Image (cartoon, rainbow, N blue to C red):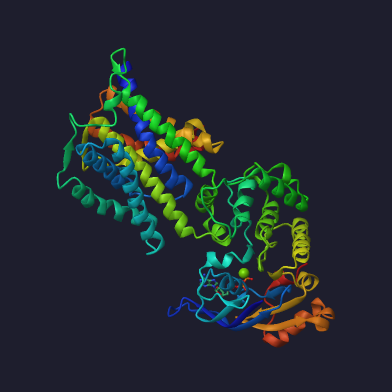
Amino acid sequence: MSVMVLLGSIELGIIYAIMALGVFVSFRTLNMPDLSVDGSFVLGAAVSAVMSLNGHPFLGLGIAFIAGCGAGSITALLHTKLKIQPLLAGILTMLALYSLNLKVMSGRANIPLINKATVFKPFEGIILGGYDYSKLLFSLAVLTLLLLLLFLFLKTRLGFVLRATGDNDQMVRALGVNTDLVILVGLALSNGLVAVAGALIAQSQSFVDVGMGIGMVVIGLASVIIGEVVFGVSSLLRRLIAVILGSILYRLIIAFALEIGMPPTDLKLVSAVIVALAMSMPILKKRFL
Amino acid sequence: MLRVESLSKTFGKGSTNEKLALNEVNLSLQEGEFVTIIGGNGAGKSTLLNCISGVYEIDEGRIILDSKDVTSDPEYKRSRNIGRVFQDPLKGTAHDMTIEENLAIAFAKGKSVGLQSGVTKKDTTLFKERLELLDLGLENRIKQKVGLLSGGQRQALTLLMATIIKPRLLLLDEHTAALDPTIARKVLSLTRKLVSEEKLCTLMITHNMKASLEYGTRTIMMHGGKIMMDLQGEERKDMTVDRLIEQFEKRSGAELDNDRMLLG
Ligand SMILES: Nc1ncnc2c1ncn2[C@@H]1O[C@H](COP(=O)(O)OP(=O)(O)OP(=O)(O)O)[C@@H](O)[C@H]1O
Ligand SMILES: [Mg+2]
């Protein structure tokens, strides 16, 4: 694997890690399989693209976050107020978002951002050994900031209650907290992070496609699980960092798969296999080790 | 203090396995009363507690707590005045969080839940003091996950969590039934200590006839969704386990089906 490919993978891993942190919040912290991710990823990308076209790429990141929060809230309300199973609630939101995303993109299936203002533009030119580090460094800065904020949030009273709701919602209600509201906050936050990742990917590849979200939830989950298996779960901070490292590792695996000649169209298959393997790790370990 | 007025609850209404679990139950509790509840399997004991705490919506009747009608309040709202310990030790705590974090959530009851620090130094000191009361050495394990504790330790912790903010009403549903006898006794005497120190109004379900007379100030017996017997004062003082069983069979017209009730 060339240094270029290696750096490129790390760069992608860093951006997708933001999405994986979002998936971590819903799947692990709230213990809720939320499939709206595929839609909110594109929503973030679409919103950020439109904002870039209008010359506000940085503001676009913030608005993408808010839009993602809105998408997550819908899923939460479908589940808590209308009593729709989490899995189905997420699928419904994802489906609805497909149409909504096209609306955001003014009916176009894709928007190119070539020669438009992006969040990376101001930092361009940090070149070393022929590689432009601007995207990697800016994404890393955003990721670090979000990681820190997420960690601090999970240490607040609301954060405690969020973690406890995923663990044992009955106890949380018995202690006087409205778990419906907690789920709303959790899914909003989760999809907000996913949307920011979508926005950064759009900015990084200067391109948004309405189908770019397919399988995102699986990729996020793969990162979370790879992180847990490889880097451990001993403390909260370690778990969060493991998610990030998991995301980077996932990108390296994909890069390796391409390197050995796998056609790019097979990548979704590879993702599914990785997740299936990682999820069955405990059983496989018991059987064969 | 607590008034339950002609409370009825039917499960699976209209289906083939429709079950009348509570049949016009009336119950009134005075300040500081410690009531033990006994009765056979399916008598409606848990359902009564679950209706009071708002886990189940009721079909008919009213629930009045502190002269406020709470019948239509959601579970979480009622919980601000009610402390609960369940039979299953897994239900009362978040196993993936530390002892300290669990206590912090309990200690936040009734306070605003926002972005304030989850647990402060001052809280930790207080938690340690309270944990010392349990005499289980948990004060030295405050940063450990609750998942590492035994069932008995968890029930003791849950009891502490249910009472760390003084509740108006404490509901205990066979909270020692899943524990081995030695630990069960310990948790029971801890219950007695906390209830009497804080003068908590308490409803405690137990399957142990002896304990039902030994603990508390009043004993009620349920059968078929009704309260069959309400023992207090002199009548209760003179009661023995044998006579209690005899009375039960006379009033309910049924054999005491529940073997485990005789134990202990
Ligand atoms: N969630 C439920 N759905 C349907 N039926 C229920 C439900 N909960 C209780 N029941 C039924 O209502 C009746 C009363 O049950 P409850 O759990 O209150 O009994 P209990 O007195 O607590 O008995 P035990 O000593 O076995 O705990 C039983 O016939 C039970 O099968
Ligand atoms: Mg019961």
Q: Where is residue A205 in the image (x, y as percent from the top left)?
A: 24, 31
Quadrant where the N terminus of chain B sits is bottom right
Q: Position of residue B20 (x, y in %)?
A: 53, 80
Quadrant where the C terminus of chain B sits is bottom right
Q: Is residue B57 left or right of residue B246?
A: left
Q: Is residue A55 left or right of residue A83?
A: left
| Residue at x 66%, y 82% (from the top left corner) | B227
* Image position of A34 with respect to A149: above or below: below
| Residue at x 83%, y 83% (from the top left corner) | B234
Q: In this view, does A124 lie to the left or right of A27?
A: left
Task: Name, please, the residue furthest toward the right.
Answer: B238
Q: Quadrant of ligand 2?
A: bottom right
Task: Name, please, the residue furthest toward the top.
Answer: A129
* Image position of B36 with respect to B85: above or below: below
Q: Which picture quadrant has residue A140? A: top left
| Residue at x 68%, y 49% (from the top left corner) | B150
Q: In this view, does B229 lie to the left or right of A168?
A: right
Is residue A270 at all visible to an observer of this figure? yes
| Residue at x 33%, y 38% (from the top left corner) | A197
Is residue A214 at all visible to an observer of this figure? no
* Image position of B28 with respect to B200: above or below: below
Q: Which picture quadrant has residue A22? A: top left
